[in-house]
Image: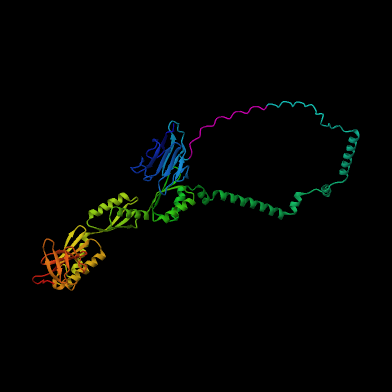
Amino acid sequence: MADVWALKILSGPHVGAEITLDPGTWILGRHEECDLVLTDETLAERQLELLVGAEGVQVTNLAHGQSITISGQPQPDTFSLPSHTVAMAGSLYFAVGVIGQPWPELNLGGPPTAAPQPAMPQPQPVQPAPAPTEVAPDPAIPIVDDQVDEDELAQLQNLDNDLATETESSPSAIDRFLSRFAGQKFDLLGWCRNHPFIVGGSALGLFMSFLIGGFAWLWAMTDPEQTALDNITPAQKAEQIITQMNFSDLRLKKLPDGSVLISGYVADNIMKNNLQQALNTAQVPYNFQAVVMNEMRATAASVLDQYDFKQMNIELDTTPGSLVLSGYASNPKEVSRIRDVLQQEVHGLISIVDQVQYQATRLKALRTMLKEKNLNQLIRLMETPGKVVLKGRLADASQGYYLKEVVQDFREKYKRPELVIDVTLPATDLATMQPLLKIKSVSLGRIPYVILDNGEKYLRGAKLKNGYILEGINLEYLTLRLGQERIKYFIGGGSHGGQ
Protein backbone atom coordinates (compact mmCIF):
# COMPACT_ATOMS: atom_id res chain seq x y z
CA MET A 1 0.00 0.00 0.00
CA ALA A 2 1.41 3.40 -0.98
CA ASP A 3 2.32 5.91 1.74
CA VAL A 4 -0.11 8.78 2.41
CA TRP A 5 1.69 12.12 2.77
CA ALA A 6 0.82 15.18 4.82
CA LEU A 7 1.94 18.83 4.63
CA LYS A 8 2.73 20.58 7.90
CA ILE A 9 2.82 24.41 8.19
CA LEU A 10 5.53 25.53 10.64
CA SER A 11 5.17 29.36 10.56
CA GLY A 12 2.85 32.20 9.63
CA PRO A 13 -0.91 32.58 10.27
CA HIS A 14 -1.53 28.84 9.69
CA VAL A 15 1.25 27.52 11.95
CA GLY A 16 0.57 23.99 13.18
CA ALA A 17 -1.84 23.10 10.36
CA GLU A 18 -1.40 19.56 8.99
CA ILE A 19 -2.98 18.86 5.58
CA THR A 20 -3.38 15.41 4.03
CA LEU A 21 -2.01 15.31 0.47
CA ASP A 22 -3.73 12.88 -1.85
CA PRO A 23 -1.69 11.69 -4.86
CA GLY A 24 -1.66 14.36 -7.56
CA THR A 25 -0.71 18.02 -8.00
CA TRP A 26 -1.29 20.72 -5.36
CA ILE A 27 -0.79 24.46 -5.95
CA LEU A 28 0.06 26.56 -2.86
CA GLY A 29 -0.19 30.37 -2.76
CA ARG A 30 -2.31 33.42 -1.91
CA HIS A 31 -4.58 33.31 -4.96
CA GLU A 32 -8.11 32.12 -4.29
CA GLU A 33 -7.90 29.61 -7.15
CA CYS A 34 -4.96 27.74 -5.55
CA ASP A 35 -5.52 24.27 -4.07
CA LEU A 36 -3.93 25.39 -0.79
CA VAL A 37 -4.76 29.07 -0.09
CA LEU A 38 -2.62 30.70 2.64
CA THR A 39 -3.14 34.27 3.88
CA ASP A 40 0.58 35.03 4.06
CA GLU A 41 1.62 38.38 2.53
CA THR A 42 5.17 37.17 1.89
CA LEU A 43 3.92 34.49 -0.51
CA ALA A 44 3.36 35.01 -4.22
CA GLU A 45 -0.05 34.55 -5.87
CA ARG A 46 1.13 31.06 -6.87
CA GLN A 47 4.17 30.18 -4.78
CA LEU A 48 4.87 26.49 -5.40
CA GLU A 49 3.55 23.20 -6.75
CA LEU A 50 3.57 19.90 -4.83
CA LEU A 51 3.55 16.72 -6.93
CA VAL A 52 2.58 13.82 -4.64
CA GLY A 53 3.36 10.33 -5.93
CA ALA A 54 4.37 6.87 -4.80
CA GLU A 55 8.06 7.85 -4.64
CA GLY A 56 7.52 10.96 -2.49
CA VAL A 57 6.82 14.67 -2.86
CA GLN A 58 8.36 16.80 -5.61
CA VAL A 59 8.38 20.60 -5.21
CA THR A 60 8.34 23.06 -8.14
CA ASN A 61 8.96 26.78 -7.52
CA LEU A 62 6.33 28.96 -9.28
CA ALA A 63 7.39 32.37 -7.85
CA HIS A 64 9.52 34.34 -10.31
CA GLY A 65 12.53 36.01 -8.69
CA GLN A 66 12.27 33.93 -5.50
CA SER A 67 13.85 30.69 -4.41
CA ILE A 68 12.97 27.88 -2.03
CA THR A 69 15.69 27.19 0.54
CA ILE A 70 16.59 24.27 2.78
CA SER A 71 18.89 25.13 5.71
CA GLY A 72 19.58 28.49 4.00
CA GLN A 73 20.71 26.86 0.71
CA PRO A 74 18.68 27.81 -2.43
CA GLN A 75 17.21 24.81 -4.23
CA PRO A 76 16.63 24.30 -7.99
CA ASP A 77 13.24 25.17 -9.46
CA THR A 78 12.20 21.49 -9.21
CA PHE A 79 13.50 19.17 -6.48
CA SER A 80 12.42 16.25 -4.30
CA LEU A 81 11.64 17.20 -0.68
CA PRO A 82 12.72 14.48 1.80
CA SER A 83 10.45 13.47 4.65
CA HIS A 84 10.61 15.64 7.81
CA THR A 85 12.93 18.20 6.15
CA VAL A 86 12.14 21.89 6.76
CA ALA A 87 11.93 24.09 3.63
CA MET A 88 11.25 27.82 3.34
CA ALA A 89 9.33 29.75 0.64
CA GLY A 90 9.05 33.49 1.28
CA SER A 91 8.86 33.53 5.10
CA LEU A 92 6.81 30.32 5.21
CA TYR A 93 8.37 27.22 6.78
CA PHE A 94 6.87 23.86 5.89
CA ALA A 95 7.68 20.14 5.79
CA VAL A 96 6.13 16.91 4.54
CA GLY A 97 5.90 13.50 6.18
CA VAL A 98 4.18 10.15 5.92
CA ILE A 99 0.94 9.88 7.89
CA GLY A 100 1.28 7.40 10.74
CA GLN A 101 4.97 8.09 11.33
CA PRO A 102 5.81 10.22 14.40
CA TRP A 103 7.09 13.74 13.63
CA PRO A 104 10.56 14.39 15.09
CA GLU A 105 11.49 17.69 16.67
CA LEU A 106 11.89 20.02 13.67
CA ASN A 107 14.55 22.71 13.65
CA LEU A 108 13.63 25.71 11.47
CA GLY A 109 17.30 26.46 10.93
CA GLY A 110 18.35 22.95 9.78
CA PRO A 111 17.50 19.25 9.53
CA PRO A 112 15.39 17.48 12.19
CA THR A 113 17.09 16.47 15.44
CA ALA A 114 18.49 12.98 15.08
CA ALA A 115 17.50 10.22 17.50
CA PRO A 116 20.19 9.16 20.04
CA GLN A 117 22.49 6.42 18.80
CA PRO A 118 22.46 3.05 20.69
CA ALA A 119 25.39 2.33 22.98
CA MET A 120 28.32 0.62 21.33
CA PRO A 121 29.03 -2.94 22.62
CA GLN A 122 32.02 -3.34 24.94
CA PRO A 123 35.04 -5.01 23.33
CA GLN A 124 35.68 -8.60 24.44
CA PRO A 125 39.03 -9.36 26.08
CA VAL A 126 41.55 -10.87 23.75
CA GLN A 127 42.18 -14.57 24.46
CA PRO A 128 45.80 -15.75 24.19
CA ALA A 129 46.48 -17.75 21.10
CA PRO A 130 47.18 -21.45 21.65
CA ALA A 131 50.76 -22.60 21.48
CA PRO A 132 51.73 -23.84 18.04
CA THR A 133 51.99 -27.56 17.62
CA GLU A 134 55.46 -28.85 16.99
CA VAL A 135 55.91 -30.24 13.52
CA ALA A 136 58.20 -33.22 12.93
CA PRO A 137 61.17 -32.35 10.73
CA ASP A 138 61.01 -33.31 7.13
CA PRO A 139 63.81 -35.74 6.26
CA ALA A 140 64.12 -34.09 2.84
CA ILE A 141 65.23 -30.71 4.40
CA PRO A 142 68.89 -30.53 5.60
CA ILE A 143 69.55 -29.50 9.24
CA VAL A 144 72.15 -26.70 9.84
CA ASP A 145 74.29 -26.96 12.97
CA ASP A 146 74.03 -23.60 14.84
CA GLN A 147 76.82 -24.37 17.36
CA VAL A 148 80.16 -22.41 17.14
CA ASP A 149 83.51 -24.07 17.66
CA GLU A 150 85.78 -22.81 20.45
CA ASP A 151 88.45 -21.76 17.91
CA GLU A 152 85.98 -19.54 16.01
CA LEU A 153 84.80 -17.91 19.26
CA ALA A 154 88.36 -17.08 20.32
CA GLN A 155 89.04 -15.39 16.94
CA LEU A 156 85.94 -13.18 17.29
CA GLN A 157 86.94 -12.04 20.80
CA ASN A 158 90.44 -11.09 19.64
CA LEU A 159 88.94 -8.99 16.79
CA ASP A 160 86.72 -7.01 19.21
CA ASN A 161 89.64 -6.26 21.54
CA ASP A 162 91.73 -4.88 18.64
CA LEU A 163 88.94 -2.48 17.57
CA ALA A 164 88.45 -1.16 21.13
CA THR A 165 92.17 -0.51 21.55
CA GLU A 166 92.36 1.40 18.25
CA THR A 167 89.39 3.62 19.24
CA GLU A 168 90.85 4.53 22.64
CA SER A 169 94.28 5.36 21.21
CA SER A 170 93.01 7.90 18.55
CA PRO A 171 90.88 10.79 20.03
CA SER A 172 88.21 12.42 17.83
CA ALA A 173 88.33 15.97 16.37
CA ILE A 174 85.70 17.20 18.84
CA ASP A 175 87.75 15.94 21.77
CA ARG A 176 90.84 17.71 20.43
CA PHE A 177 88.85 21.02 20.05
CA LEU A 178 87.43 20.88 23.57
CA SER A 179 90.82 20.05 25.06
CA ARG A 180 92.00 23.59 24.11
CA PHE A 181 89.58 25.15 26.61
CA ALA A 182 89.82 22.48 29.30
CA GLY A 183 91.88 24.68 31.62
CA GLN A 184 89.95 27.97 31.06
CA LYS A 185 86.88 29.38 32.90
CA PHE A 186 84.41 31.80 31.23
CA ASP A 187 83.53 34.82 33.40
CA LEU A 188 80.05 35.97 32.17
CA LEU A 189 79.71 38.84 34.65
CA GLY A 190 83.11 40.14 33.79
CA TRP A 191 82.36 40.06 30.08
CA CYS A 192 79.13 42.00 30.63
CA ARG A 193 81.00 44.66 32.67
CA ASN A 194 83.53 45.04 29.88
CA HIS A 195 80.83 45.34 27.12
CA PRO A 196 77.99 47.46 28.61
CA PHE A 197 76.82 48.97 25.30
CA ILE A 198 76.38 45.59 23.63
CA VAL A 199 74.47 44.23 26.61
CA GLY A 200 72.26 47.35 26.90
CA GLY A 201 71.50 47.48 23.18
CA SER A 202 70.57 43.81 23.10
CA ALA A 203 68.30 44.19 26.13
CA LEU A 204 66.65 47.30 24.66
CA GLY A 205 66.10 45.59 21.30
CA LEU A 206 64.59 42.56 22.98
CA PHE A 207 62.29 44.79 25.06
CA MET A 208 61.15 46.80 22.02
CA SER A 209 60.43 43.59 20.11
CA PHE A 210 58.21 42.34 22.89
CA LEU A 211 56.53 45.76 23.16
CA ILE A 212 55.79 46.06 19.42
CA GLY A 213 54.54 42.48 19.24
CA GLY A 214 52.22 43.10 22.18
CA PHE A 215 50.78 46.26 20.62
CA ALA A 216 50.24 44.47 17.29
CA TRP A 217 48.46 41.62 19.03
CA LEU A 218 46.24 44.01 21.01
CA TRP A 219 45.40 46.03 17.85
CA ALA A 220 44.45 42.89 15.93
CA MET A 221 42.22 41.81 18.79
CA THR A 222 40.54 45.23 19.29
CA ASP A 223 40.42 46.72 15.72
CA PRO A 224 36.89 48.22 15.53
CA GLU A 225 36.64 47.85 11.75
CA GLN A 226 37.72 44.22 11.83
CA THR A 227 35.41 43.52 14.76
CA ALA A 228 32.51 45.13 12.91
CA LEU A 229 33.25 43.08 9.78
CA ASP A 230 33.41 39.87 11.81
CA ASN A 231 30.09 40.56 13.57
CA ILE A 232 28.06 41.98 10.65
CA THR A 233 24.71 40.27 9.97
CA PRO A 234 23.20 39.48 6.53
CA ALA A 235 20.64 42.25 7.06
CA GLN A 236 23.41 44.77 7.72
CA LYS A 237 25.32 43.59 4.64
CA ALA A 238 22.20 44.02 2.51
CA GLU A 239 21.58 47.49 3.97
CA GLN A 240 25.15 48.57 3.18
CA ILE A 241 24.88 47.30 -0.41
CA ILE A 242 21.52 49.01 -0.99
CA THR A 243 22.85 52.29 0.45
CA GLN A 244 26.02 52.16 -1.66
CA MET A 245 23.99 51.46 -4.84
CA ASN A 246 21.54 54.28 -3.98
CA PHE A 247 18.34 52.19 -3.91
CA SER A 248 16.25 54.63 -1.87
CA ASP A 249 12.88 52.97 -2.59
CA LEU A 250 13.70 49.50 -1.23
CA ARG A 251 12.74 48.15 2.21
CA LEU A 252 14.40 45.35 4.19
CA LYS A 253 12.93 42.91 6.69
CA LYS A 254 14.92 40.33 8.63
CA LEU A 255 13.30 36.88 8.55
CA PRO A 256 13.49 34.33 11.40
CA ASP A 257 16.02 32.17 9.55
CA GLY A 258 18.45 35.09 9.23
CA SER A 259 17.71 35.82 5.57
CA VAL A 260 16.44 39.17 4.29
CA LEU A 261 13.10 40.00 2.63
CA ILE A 262 13.55 42.79 0.04
CA SER A 263 10.45 44.75 -1.02
CA GLY A 264 9.72 48.16 -2.54
CA TYR A 265 10.50 49.38 -6.07
CA VAL A 266 13.39 49.38 -8.57
CA ALA A 267 13.42 51.21 -11.89
CA ASP A 268 14.22 48.40 -14.34
CA ASN A 269 15.59 44.87 -14.70
CA ILE A 270 19.17 46.09 -15.15
CA MET A 271 19.18 47.65 -11.68
CA LYS A 272 17.47 44.55 -10.27
CA ASN A 273 20.13 42.23 -11.76
CA ASN A 274 22.98 44.44 -10.49
CA LEU A 275 21.55 44.37 -6.97
CA GLN A 276 21.04 40.61 -6.98
CA GLN A 277 24.59 40.06 -8.25
CA ALA A 278 26.00 42.22 -5.43
CA LEU A 279 23.95 40.33 -2.82
CA ASN A 280 25.09 36.97 -4.19
CA THR A 281 28.72 38.09 -4.18
CA ALA A 282 28.38 39.12 -0.52
CA GLN A 283 26.72 35.74 0.23
CA VAL A 284 23.58 37.39 1.61
CA PRO A 285 20.56 35.02 1.75
CA TYR A 286 17.56 37.01 0.50
CA ASN A 287 14.02 36.79 -0.83
CA PHE A 288 13.49 39.39 -3.59
CA GLN A 289 9.89 40.65 -3.82
CA ALA A 290 10.48 44.22 -5.04
CA VAL A 291 8.40 45.54 -7.95
CA VAL A 292 10.17 46.49 -11.20
CA MET A 293 8.59 49.76 -12.43
CA ASN A 294 9.12 49.01 -16.14
CA GLU A 295 7.39 45.64 -15.75
CA MET A 296 4.53 47.30 -13.86
CA ARG A 297 4.00 49.81 -16.70
CA ALA A 298 4.10 47.01 -19.31
CA THR A 299 1.51 45.06 -17.33
CA ALA A 300 -0.76 48.12 -17.15
CA ALA A 301 -0.47 48.69 -20.93
CA SER A 302 -1.36 45.04 -21.53
CA VAL A 303 -4.45 45.41 -19.31
CA LEU A 304 -5.60 48.45 -21.33
CA ASP A 305 -5.31 46.45 -24.55
CA GLN A 306 -7.05 43.46 -23.02
CA TYR A 307 -10.07 45.54 -21.98
CA ASP A 308 -10.11 47.43 -25.32
CA PHE A 309 -9.22 50.84 -23.86
CA LYS A 310 -7.47 51.83 -27.09
CA GLN A 311 -7.77 55.60 -26.51
CA MET A 312 -5.77 55.41 -23.26
CA ASN A 313 -2.02 55.64 -22.69
CA ILE A 314 -0.09 54.67 -19.55
CA GLU A 315 3.36 55.96 -18.57
CA LEU A 316 5.64 55.91 -15.53
CA ASP A 317 5.36 58.64 -12.92
CA THR A 318 8.28 60.04 -10.94
CA THR A 319 6.84 58.56 -7.73
CA PRO A 320 7.47 54.83 -7.07
CA GLY A 321 4.31 52.77 -7.48
CA SER A 322 2.55 55.53 -9.47
CA LEU A 323 1.49 55.60 -13.15
CA VAL A 324 0.19 58.42 -15.38
CA LEU A 325 -3.04 57.75 -17.30
CA SER A 326 -3.64 59.94 -20.38
CA GLY A 327 -5.75 59.86 -23.51
CA TYR A 328 -9.40 60.56 -24.31
CA ALA A 329 -12.66 59.53 -22.64
CA SER A 330 -16.24 60.54 -23.28
CA ASN A 331 -16.97 61.05 -19.56
CA PRO A 332 -15.37 60.66 -16.08
CA LYS A 333 -17.38 57.50 -15.41
CA GLU A 334 -15.42 55.65 -18.09
CA VAL A 335 -12.12 56.77 -16.56
CA SER A 336 -13.24 55.62 -13.11
CA ARG A 337 -13.89 52.14 -14.52
CA ILE A 338 -10.44 52.06 -16.12
CA ARG A 339 -8.79 53.06 -12.83
CA ASP A 340 -10.62 50.30 -10.94
CA VAL A 341 -9.49 47.68 -13.47
CA LEU A 342 -5.84 48.79 -13.26
CA GLN A 343 -5.86 48.79 -9.45
CA GLN A 344 -7.12 45.20 -9.44
CA GLU A 345 -4.91 43.78 -12.21
CA VAL A 346 -1.51 45.52 -11.75
CA HIS A 347 0.62 44.27 -8.85
CA GLY A 348 2.44 47.01 -6.94
CA LEU A 349 0.31 49.88 -8.31
CA ILE A 350 -0.37 52.44 -5.55
CA SER A 351 -1.75 55.52 -7.33
CA ILE A 352 -2.78 56.75 -10.80
CA VAL A 353 -2.25 60.33 -11.97
CA ASP A 354 -5.26 61.35 -14.12
CA GLN A 355 -4.31 63.36 -17.22
CA VAL A 356 -7.27 62.19 -19.34
CA GLN A 357 -9.04 64.69 -21.61
CA TYR A 358 -12.82 64.46 -21.79
CA GLN A 359 -15.16 65.07 -24.73
CA ALA A 360 -16.55 68.26 -23.17
CA THR A 361 -13.04 69.73 -22.96
CA ARG A 362 -12.30 68.95 -26.60
CA LEU A 363 -15.65 70.34 -27.76
CA LYS A 364 -14.71 73.59 -26.09
CA ALA A 365 -11.46 73.61 -28.07
CA LEU A 366 -13.42 72.86 -31.30
CA ARG A 367 -15.78 75.80 -30.70
CA THR A 368 -12.77 78.07 -30.19
CA MET A 369 -11.29 76.92 -33.51
CA LEU A 370 -14.61 77.56 -35.31
CA LYS A 371 -14.84 81.02 -33.77
CA GLU A 372 -11.36 81.91 -35.05
CA LYS A 373 -12.62 81.17 -38.61
CA ASN A 374 -15.93 83.05 -38.05
CA LEU A 375 -17.89 79.81 -38.42
CA ASN A 376 -19.32 79.57 -34.91
CA GLN A 377 -22.62 81.21 -35.98
CA LEU A 378 -23.03 78.94 -39.02
CA ILE A 379 -22.08 75.51 -37.61
CA ARG A 380 -23.94 73.68 -34.86
CA LEU A 381 -22.27 70.86 -32.89
CA MET A 382 -24.49 67.84 -32.31
CA GLU A 383 -22.83 65.73 -29.61
CA THR A 384 -23.17 61.96 -29.24
CA PRO A 385 -20.93 59.57 -27.23
CA GLY A 386 -17.62 59.38 -29.07
CA LYS A 387 -18.89 61.36 -32.08
CA VAL A 388 -19.68 65.01 -32.95
CA VAL A 389 -21.67 66.07 -36.03
CA LEU A 390 -20.92 69.49 -37.56
CA LYS A 391 -24.20 70.59 -39.14
CA GLY A 392 -25.03 73.85 -40.90
CA ARG A 393 -25.36 75.84 -44.13
CA LEU A 394 -22.42 77.79 -45.54
CA ALA A 395 -22.66 80.93 -47.67
CA ASP A 396 -19.75 80.31 -50.05
CA ALA A 397 -16.91 77.98 -50.89
CA SER A 398 -14.36 79.92 -48.84
CA GLN A 399 -16.27 79.02 -45.69
CA GLY A 400 -16.15 75.41 -46.83
CA TYR A 401 -12.38 75.59 -47.08
CA TYR A 402 -12.14 77.15 -43.60
CA LEU A 403 -14.31 74.37 -42.21
CA LYS A 404 -12.08 71.75 -43.79
CA GLU A 405 -9.02 73.39 -42.18
CA VAL A 406 -10.66 73.39 -38.75
CA VAL A 407 -11.64 69.73 -39.02
CA GLN A 408 -8.19 68.70 -40.28
CA ASP A 409 -6.37 70.60 -37.50
CA PHE A 410 -8.65 69.10 -34.84
CA ARG A 411 -8.13 65.55 -36.10
CA GLU A 412 -4.35 65.93 -36.22
CA LYS A 413 -4.21 67.34 -32.69
CA TYR A 414 -6.81 65.28 -30.83
CA LYS A 415 -7.95 62.38 -33.11
CA ARG A 416 -10.95 61.84 -30.81
CA PRO A 417 -13.89 62.37 -30.73
CA GLU A 418 -14.82 61.46 -34.28
CA LEU A 419 -16.01 64.45 -36.35
CA VAL A 420 -18.77 64.09 -38.97
CA ILE A 421 -19.35 66.97 -41.44
CA ASP A 422 -22.96 67.46 -42.53
CA VAL A 423 -23.13 70.90 -44.21
CA THR A 424 -24.89 72.46 -47.20
CA LEU A 425 -23.08 74.57 -49.82
CA PRO A 426 -24.67 76.67 -52.66
CA ALA A 427 -24.73 74.83 -55.96
CA THR A 428 -23.13 77.77 -57.78
CA ASP A 429 -20.03 77.59 -55.56
CA LEU A 430 -19.80 73.84 -55.27
CA ALA A 431 -17.93 73.69 -58.58
CA THR A 432 -14.90 75.31 -56.95
CA MET A 433 -14.67 72.52 -54.33
CA GLN A 434 -15.15 69.33 -56.35
CA PRO A 435 -15.79 68.36 -60.02
CA LEU A 436 -19.18 69.33 -61.47
CA LEU A 437 -21.87 66.70 -61.90
CA LYS A 438 -23.68 67.22 -65.22
CA ILE A 439 -27.03 65.69 -64.36
CA LYS A 440 -29.39 64.91 -67.23
CA SER A 441 -32.30 63.51 -65.21
CA VAL A 442 -33.35 62.08 -61.85
CA SER A 443 -35.67 59.10 -61.42
CA LEU A 444 -37.53 58.72 -58.11
CA GLY A 445 -39.29 55.45 -58.85
CA ARG A 446 -39.19 52.32 -56.77
CA ILE A 447 -35.40 52.32 -57.19
CA PRO A 448 -34.13 55.96 -57.40
CA TYR A 449 -31.20 56.70 -59.71
CA VAL A 450 -29.43 59.59 -61.48
CA ILE A 451 -28.50 59.81 -65.18
CA LEU A 452 -25.59 62.08 -66.17
CA ASP A 453 -25.18 63.87 -69.52
CA ASN A 454 -22.80 61.16 -70.75
CA GLY A 455 -25.47 58.51 -70.16
CA GLU A 456 -23.95 57.01 -67.00
CA LYS A 457 -26.54 55.84 -64.50
CA TYR A 458 -25.90 55.74 -60.71
CA LEU A 459 -28.08 54.12 -58.09
CA ARG A 460 -28.20 55.17 -54.46
CA GLY A 461 -25.01 54.00 -52.72
CA ALA A 462 -22.89 54.09 -55.89
CA LYS A 463 -19.42 55.63 -55.90
CA LEU A 464 -18.92 58.51 -58.35
CA LYS A 465 -15.76 59.15 -60.34
CA ASN A 466 -14.85 62.12 -58.13
CA GLY A 467 -14.66 59.81 -55.11
CA TYR A 468 -17.96 60.79 -53.50
CA ILE A 469 -20.63 58.20 -52.63
CA LEU A 470 -24.21 58.92 -53.73
CA GLU A 471 -25.89 58.53 -50.35
CA GLY A 472 -29.29 60.12 -51.02
CA ILE A 473 -31.43 61.17 -54.06
CA ASN A 474 -34.38 63.58 -54.19
CA LEU A 475 -35.66 66.27 -56.57
CA GLU A 476 -33.89 69.18 -54.79
CA TYR A 477 -30.43 67.84 -54.00
CA LEU A 478 -28.15 64.85 -53.89
CA THR A 479 -26.48 63.83 -50.61
CA LEU A 480 -22.81 63.12 -51.27
CA ARG A 481 -20.40 61.59 -48.72
CA LEU A 482 -16.62 61.40 -48.74
CA GLY A 483 -15.21 59.78 -45.62
CA GLN A 484 -16.72 61.62 -42.67
CA GLU A 485 -17.80 64.62 -44.83
CA ARG A 486 -21.38 64.84 -46.00
CA ILE A 487 -22.54 67.54 -48.51
CA LYS A 488 -25.93 68.37 -49.96
CA TYR A 489 -25.55 69.00 -53.72
CA PHE A 490 -28.50 71.07 -54.97
CA ILE A 491 -29.62 70.25 -58.51
CA GLY A 492 -32.32 72.85 -59.21
CA GLY A 493 -34.81 75.43 -58.02
CA GLY A 494 -34.56 79.06 -56.91
CA SER A 495 -31.22 80.49 -56.02
CA HIS A 496 -29.66 76.98 -55.93
CA GLY A 497 -30.06 76.26 -59.60
CA GLY A 498 -29.13 72.81 -60.85
CA GLN A 499 -25.72 71.99 -62.19
In the image, what residue occupies the spot 44% across and 51% down?
239
Position of 137 relative to 228 (above/below): above
Q: Which residue range is magenta in the image?
A: 110-126
Quadrant the N terminus occupies = top left
* Residue 130, quarter of picture: top right
* In the image, farthest residue toward the right: 151
Q: Is residue 49 magenta?
A: no
In the image, what residue occupies the spot 50% across and 47% down?
231
* In the image, farthest residue toward the front: 455
| Rendered location of residue 491, percent (x, y) | 12, 69
Q: Does residue 371 appear to the left or right of 79 in the view shown?
A: left
Which one is in front, 208 or 488? 488
Position of 231 relative to 493 (above/below): above
Q: Is residue 124 magenta?
A: yes
Q: Does residue 313 appear to the left or right of 86 in the view shown?
A: left
**Dominant secondary structure of the residues highlighted in magenta in the image:** loop
Which one is in front, 189 or 315? 315
| Rendered location of residue 438, percent (x, y) | 15, 72
Residue 393 in view of the camera: no
Please count the marks in the image. Answer: 0
Which one is in front, 488 or 468? 468
| Rendered location of residue 200, percent (x, y) | 69, 53
| Rendered location of residue 373, percent (x, y) | 19, 70
Q: Does residue 193 appear to the left or right of 249 in the view shown?
A: right
Position of 143 relative to 432 (above/below): above
Residue 127 in view of the camera: yes
Quadrant the C terminus occupies = bottom left
Please say which color scheme the image uses. rainbow
Q: Does residue 218 appear to the left or right of 48 in the view shown?
A: right
